[in-house]
Image: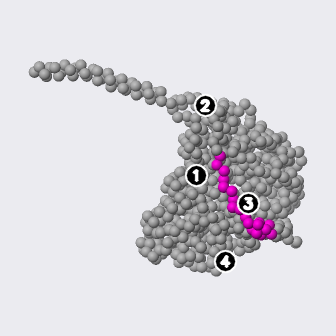
Amino acid sequence: MKNFKEKNYKLSINYPLQLCLVILVLLITACAELEKPQPEPFYAETAPPPKKEFRWNNGKMPKSFDPALAAAPPETDVVRAIYEGLTDTNPKTLETIPAIAVDWAASGDNKIWTFTLRRDAKWSNGEQVTAKDFVRSWKRLAKMGDKVSHYKLLNNIVGMQVAEKEETPPQESEEPDLSPKSPFNQDLPQIFKKPNPNTAQKTEIKPALPPKQSEADKKSETEVKTKITEKKETKPGTKFGVEAIDNYTLKISLVQPDKDFPALVAHPIFRPIYGDGKEFEGDKLNADIVTSGAFRVFSVGQDGITLDRAEHYWNSGKIELERVRFVPTENAEKALDAYRKGEVDAITNVDFEPLALKLLTPYDDFERTMHSALNFYEFNRENAPFDNRQVREALAIAIERERLSEDEMDGASLPALSFSPFDEETKIKLRQDTERAKNLLTEAGFPNSENFPKIKLLINRNNMQQRIARSVAKMWKDNLNIETEITVKETDEIEAAKKTGEFDMIRRGVVLPTTDEAANMLAIFPSKESAAETKTAKKNKENETSKIEKPKNNENVSEQIKGETFDNENLALGTFENMEENGAILTEDEALAELPAIPLYFPTSYSLVKPYILGFEINTLDAPSLKNVRINYNWQPEKTGGES
């Protein structure tokens, strides 16, 4: 009895103590939660600039102001700012909008286009922009030939066809590296701390030098270039299809119908220049050039390029920015540091590495955008069983693209369930479906993949592409029990293999500089089949069964070549006259019906834009405009707890 009382006594003493301890722990935990800092909504919260000035870091210094040489940012960004074309592209919707041309009309067959020019369009020296300026500038493009960036965009204009090279000496491939980059250096997290002016920048990784050419190759290349140059002039008697009816009426004749031609001429290369182009000669950028855009060049220096609002621009009253500064940086780390310190208002055209992307993704001022480019595996349809569409579809839908993008590319790409990055509403998608893939192989004569040959997959020497190839090969093995032999070759070997056909599938990448569907399909699938090959392909397709049916109607398809593939494959001029006979693929529906290739992924581009910058639209075409950019001086950083 005594022990029982002592025990109750001890419990009566310990219970209040235990209760106090529990309450104390809860209070400490609550205080810790209250004191825990909330994540900042923006990567960098700095005040707006004191004047209407937009400071833009879009990579390194541009090499030229010449519209004819504008292939990609930063050159295309500057050209869009200082030159005006017939039409422009709405940066938000990608629709074609008026620029120097206020109206346009096409003939019934869409082969003759007439543009009416505005009468208040002026050069920066006050002179009027007329139709003759377009004629002169486009004749210059025709004369420059394959020196023009994306010169194949010229080919459907009468008299502007660029002669293709009859032979190409071994050289570095023009195909861009569309792979996510290698891991970022381990010191990157330092950039995500508060800015420290005394922090030294890390070593910049330099790209490898291109392979050296032998003297014989150099001589051969020189001879070929000389030969082509001699062919660039318009043949005697050949009509030039660009005509100034009067100062404000421009008529353009096309080789093949193009219902989307106004969208094509929004590209920077079609913007007219003042004079004959001599001001672009030499290695230095000329700040004294005469321009026609919303901004004019004010100065060029080592610290970048400064543009001022053009007083003679026809719509200058609607341009809010007074000044734009292009601030170049050597690498992504320095760009991030400048953004963090408030030295720039936006960053584009910078290769952020996987670690940087993971750290930047949570911030509201960071944006990831699908880029107008495609990575894919093209079939050699001359080799059995890849001449069978059922086999091609089975391999296409056995790939888990979402896992490929997330696991192998660290989320630095978006899965390509179709061929076009612009047609997001495409009903037909190449979604992963293992069971259907197995059924297709059975219908093609390979039940349980029995007797299916080992796939010979050819890729370029790139670490990321090798990882992707190994992952795809594993998916084919796990899902279909099909073996793959991966062959890695250098650029010149890849080009040789394309000609000999020593592969079953080959990795390719294409950048698409326009929103025109036919142009993009022709960039991805150049029309190069012989009539016999086309006949065989059509016969095979008629005997195959697929859920994806080729459209019965093709009346509204644009029949021309405007796209630019950065492969070394060139489209023959005869393609224009024989598209139908050569089995050209002009729509995405046709591409999905035929499946000449397996789309894998779309690369992504990245940007950082300060929250006080409005109207700066980043888009798939990588064509932002400065015309609608404005600064919100009332913006204030958001405080903890959501207050401002």
* Pointer 4 residue: 530
Could you tell me how far apart the alpha carbons at marks 2 and 4 are, in whole angstroms? 63 Å
Residue closest to the eye, 298 or 293? 298
Residue type at mark 3 is His
Callout 2 environment at 10 Å: few (<14), some (14 to 19), or many (20+)?
some
The numbered mark, 1 or 2, whose residue comes first in the sequence reads 1
Disc with the residue nearer the chain's start (4 vs 3): 3
User: Quick one: SS at disc 3?
Assistant: loop
> Mark 4 is on which residue type?
Ser
For residue 158, say whether it is visible: no
| Number of the label disc, if any, that sits on residue 637 | 2
Q: CA distance from mark 1 to mark 3?
A: 28 Å
Residue 182 numbered tag: 1
Give the CA separation, mark 3 to mark 2.
43 Å
Q: How many C-alpha atoms fall within 10 Å of the one at disc 3: few (<14), some, or many (≥20)? A: many
The residue that disc 3 covers is 150
Pick whichever of labels 1 and 4 is earlier in the sequence: 1
Q: Residue at x 65, y 33 (%)?
A: 198
Residues shaded magenta: 204-223
Quarter holding the N terminus is top left
The spot of residue 58 in percent (x, y) is: 69, 45
Q: Which mark is residue 491?
A: none
What amino acid type is highlighted by mark number 2? Pro
Q: CA distance from mark 4 to mark 3?
A: 25 Å
Which residue is located at x 33 percent, y 25 percent?
A: 22
